Amino acid sequence: MKTFYDIQQLLKRYGMIVYTGSRLGDLELMEDEVQELYDMKILEKEDYLVARMILRNEINKERDKNE
């Protein structure tokens, strides 16, 4: 897992398609979904950490862009 797209595909594999109309909203919701998958022991720790890092970077970029 290396990109935002990879995270979208991971969530899609578990039946989760995230689209709220707001990129920042999508990113935050995806972060919550990844957390839930990890809490349910579906995601391995390494995959979880990588996904969180990618999403955090994207969230920070989006917030900086909106300022």
Image (cartoon, helix red, strand yellow):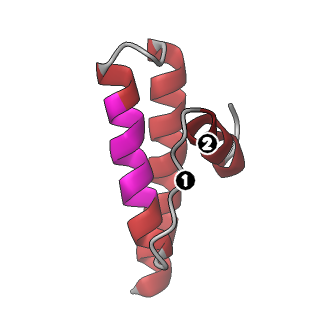
* Mark 2 and mark 1: Cα distance apart in space: 6 Å
Question: Dot 1: few (<14), some (14–19), or many (≥20) neighbours within 10 Å?
Answer: some
User: In the figure, residue 7 lies in which quadrant?
Assistant: top right
Callout 1: SS: loop
Cβ atoms under marks 2 and 1 closer than 8 Å = yes
Residue 50 locus on image (x, y percent): 54, 30
Quarter-of-image position of residue 36: top left
Q: Quadrant of the C terminus?
A: bottom left
Viewed as shown, does residue 21 lie left or right of 67?
A: right
**Element carrying mark 2:** helix
Q: Nearer the viewer, residue 28 or 18?
A: 18
Given the image, on which type of amino acid does mark 1 rest? Ile
Residue at the front extreme, as displayed: 15
> Magenta span: helix, strand or loop, mainly?
helix
Name the disc covering residue 2, or none: none
Relative horizontal placement of residue 44, taking residue 4 as reference (left or right): left
In primary-sequence order, the first of circles 2 and 1 is 2
**25 to 16, vertically: above or below:** below
Give percent across and percent down for residue 62. 49, 72
Q: Quadrant of the N terminus?
A: top right
Whether residue 31 appears in magenta in the rendering, the answer is yes
Q: What residue is rendered at 32% in x and 18% in y? A: 40
Q: Which residues are magenta?
A: 27-36
Amino acid at pointer 2: Lys
* Residue 17, numbered circle: 1
Q: Looking at the rendered structure, which numbered label has been put on residue 12?
A: 2
Q: Where residue 8 appears, x then y in whole percent?
A: 62, 47
